[in-house]
Amino acid sequence: MPYVQRDWRKGIIAVCYTPYMEDKEWDFITDDDPDFIAYLAETPPLEPPTKEDLKRLSHEWKRIGEEQEAIRDEVLSFHTAFSGLEQSLSVLLHNILNAGTSRVAYAIYYSPTSFDARAELVGNALIQIATEQKQLVDLLPYWKAITAKMQGVRRLRNAIAHSAPANHSIKGKIYARLAPPAFDVIRIRRKIEKGQIPGLTAQDIRHGSKKVRYISEGIDRVNRLVAEFRDGNPSLLRRYAALAAHPMAGHSPAQSAQSAKSPPKRQRQQPPSGG
């Protein structure tokens, strides 16, 4: 004989044989109650799972749990890497201002409340000093490349900040993701309707962390160059060579600066053929 829970119309909305929610009202009825028979006709009980079904579900949920744990670890790694990026930018502003032992530059950097504003502040300061000091003018194309890459990781950071671990069941398969809220029809429902799987995988976040560290390394190279300029190095060729060695540089202006200082290599002449 079951217990039932009813809505305000007195229709049955839940059935159980042991009430499990004390804050809800449950009515005890007989198995031949007309309302109960009608409820079963509309919502027939599910077939109990087989041993094979339970084994498959156990493996599936184990996989999902491991993937969600990996996502949490990668989120922490990403936040750590992004904190390092902010530190590199603040140190760059300190070197641009030649602040010495003063911490005013750090106070200036962390005054804006958004990362975009802080990065723009440092960028404007670097552009200004590179415009005023000819020895630093070759930094501008390199900094432009850094800025473009920072936009990509900024978008990823915003996606991570506004997401949470979620499991999506799509066409009978469960996917573990870091995803926007379930009721976000724009970023969840519309993607599913297009045949896409919404959210970020652990690999997506791991790839983003590598990008952040890559950008931080590039900023640190700029830091060393500006610091060497402040120390009075008149040529800075060694530091420009370090920039050129970094993959972010691409077609670095440092290469042209180096070639201007070095004479072109002579082509090796082949010995005349014959005796």
Image: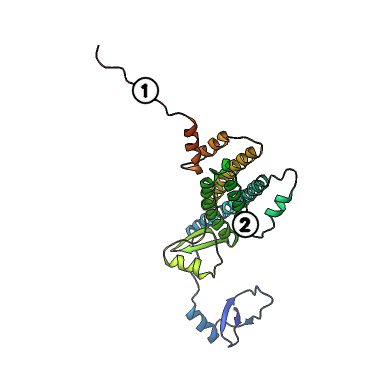
Q: Nearer the viewer, residue 38 or 164?
A: 164
Q: Nearer the viewer, residue 48 or 56?
A: 56
- The answer to whether residue 202 is visible is no
Q: Amino acid at mark 2?
A: Phe
Q: Nearer the viewer, residue 145 or 54?
A: 145
Q: Quadrant of the N terminus?
A: bottom right
Q: CA distance from mark 2 to mark 1?
A: 54 Å
Q: Secondary structure at mark 2?
A: helix
* Classed neighbour count for the residue bearing mark 1: other residues with Cα under 10 Å, few (<14), some (14–19), many (≥20): few
Q: Residue at (48%, 76%) from the top-left corner?
A: 44
Q: Secondary structure at mark 1?
A: loop
Q: Check the image and name the residue furthest to the left.
A: 274
Q: Tell me where residue 218 appears, x and y as whole percent.
A: 56, 43
Q: Check the image and name the residue furthest to the bottom.
A: 9
Q: Quadrant of the C terminus?
A: top left
Q: Tell me where residue 45 appears, x and y as whole percent.
A: 50, 73
Q: Residue at (54%, 82%) from the top-left corner?
A: 36
Q: Amino acid at mark 1?
A: Arg
Q: Quadrant of residue 196?
A: bottom left
Q: Nearer the viewer, residue 76 or 44?
A: 76
Q: For this view, does 259 lie left or right of residue 127?
A: left
Q: Which residue lies under the disc numbered 1?
A: 268
Q: Residue at (73%, 51%) from the top-left corner?
A: 104
* Classed neighbour count for the residue bearing mark 2: other residues with Cα under 10 Å, few (<14), some (14–19), many (≥20): few
Q: Tell me where residue 133 appears, x and y as whole percent.
A: 59, 44
Q: Quadrant of residue 231?
A: top right
- The answer to whether residue 184 is visible is yes
Q: Tell me where residue 114 appears, x and y as whole percent.
A: 63, 59
Q: Which residue lies under the disc numbered 2?
A: 115
Q: Decide: is 182 above or below 8.
A: above
Q: Earlier in the sequence, mark 2 or mark 1?
A: 2
